[in-house]
Image (cartoon, rainbow, N blue to C red):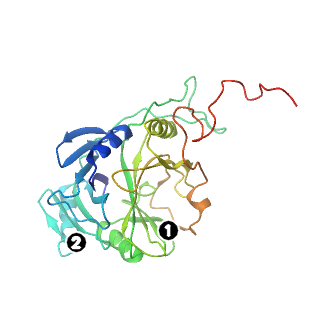
Amino acid sequence: MSILGIDEITFGASDLAKCRQFFLDWGLSLVSEEAQALVFESLNGCRVIVAHSDTPGLPPGVEPDPTLREVVWGVESAQDLERYRGRLADLPGFVDSGERLGCTDPSGLAFKLQIGVKRSLQLDCARTNTWAEQTRVNQPSPAYDRATPIEVGHVVFFVKNLEQTTAFYQDKLDFVLSDRYPGRGSFLRCAAEGGHHDLFLLQLPEPRSGLNHVAFTVRDVHEVMGGGLHMSRCGWQTELGPGRHPISSAIFWYFISPAGALVEYYTDEDQLTGDWQPRDFTPGPTVFAEWAITGGIDGNTRRQVNAAAPSGRFMTDKPKP
């Protein structure tokens, strides 16, 4: 078996109080709080740790804090863990505690593997009626006051050597290429069958290492909207969204995070199998977003940020010229 997905991520940051409030507003549950570290969980048990930058034993960052310091991936069984142990044992930064093992990837990012701990969930999600198929009958779609993320669905990093780092995840960890920006970006999924990407690697024209964003999966498009509006009401700043990615088909909303770079709500990504053939794209604004709102939507007016509040009148309720 291949890797199942992300079990845990660890940020390094100095303003733990601000990070605490941010991730509570984001919809995570705070399960542990100490002077040097906060531990949050998503609905299925995926963990988000925010550790103070000077915490002993914290893996070194590939860029100054705040940023992501470590990713822990889940595998299915002890046999899988043993198989990866044989592949990684001679690589830089190798560590092995028995239950967890890992090393650093070619960009210097620390990662570990463990037997997966996330819980299986059965959740009610919105159904969409199309012209061809009506699956929602006598039932309105849900509306959400806020989001409660299901898991960390993917992570995105800037890397200095795209080809080398992509090959590492394919050869050592069995990741599968979904799509690519030739020479600029690789969308990778953990297994042949799964969501469009669990890891996205980007090489800038002037290469550097760092975090681009961490993405949290939510139930449906309505939860993206409810979560984004709640974050807006709480005063957190939108980077871009809501919007839609043409490459993965996902609906997104990005916010600026005090734990480093951006975090994203997303849903409705493409599901792929081994029959999928990777496509090549040229980076550009229309490839990144089919549509998107800069600055987000105000959580109170329900209109684009800085737009006038609704009056309550019908749109055509005005004198004719």
- The residue at the point 31 percent across, 57 percent down is 66
Point out residue 278 in the picture as x, y percentages from the top left corner.
Answer: 51, 66
Query: Which corner quadrant of the image does residue 140 belong to?
Result: top right
Query: Which corner quadrant of the image does residue 191 belong to?
Result: bottom left
Q: What is the three-letter code of the residue carrying label 1?
A: Arg
Point out residue 209 in the picture as x, y percentages from the top left corner.
Answer: 36, 70
* Disc 1 packing (10 Å; few <14; some 14–19; many ≥20): many
Front-lying residue, 107 or 299: 299
Disc 1 secondary structure class: strand
- The residue at the point 43 percent across, 43 percent down is 236
Q: Could you tell me if residue 1 is visible in this image?
A: no
Residue at mark 1: 180
- The residue at the point 19 percent across, 40 percent down is 32
Q: Could you tell me if residue 23 is visible in this image?
A: yes
- Cα distance in 3D space between marks 1 and 2: 26 Å
Point out residue 282 in the picture as x, y percentages from the top left corner.
Answer: 58, 69
Residue 87 is tagged as 2
Point out residue 180 in the picture as x, y percentages from the top left corner.
Answer: 50, 68
Disc 2 secondary structure class: helix
Q: What is the three-letter code of the residue carrying label 2?
A: Arg
Is the residue 179 above or below the residue 151 in the image?
A: below
Q: Residue furthest right?
A: 321
- The answer to whether the residues at label 1 and label 2 have Cβ atoms under 8 Å apart is no
> Of tags 1 and 2, which is closer to the observer?
1
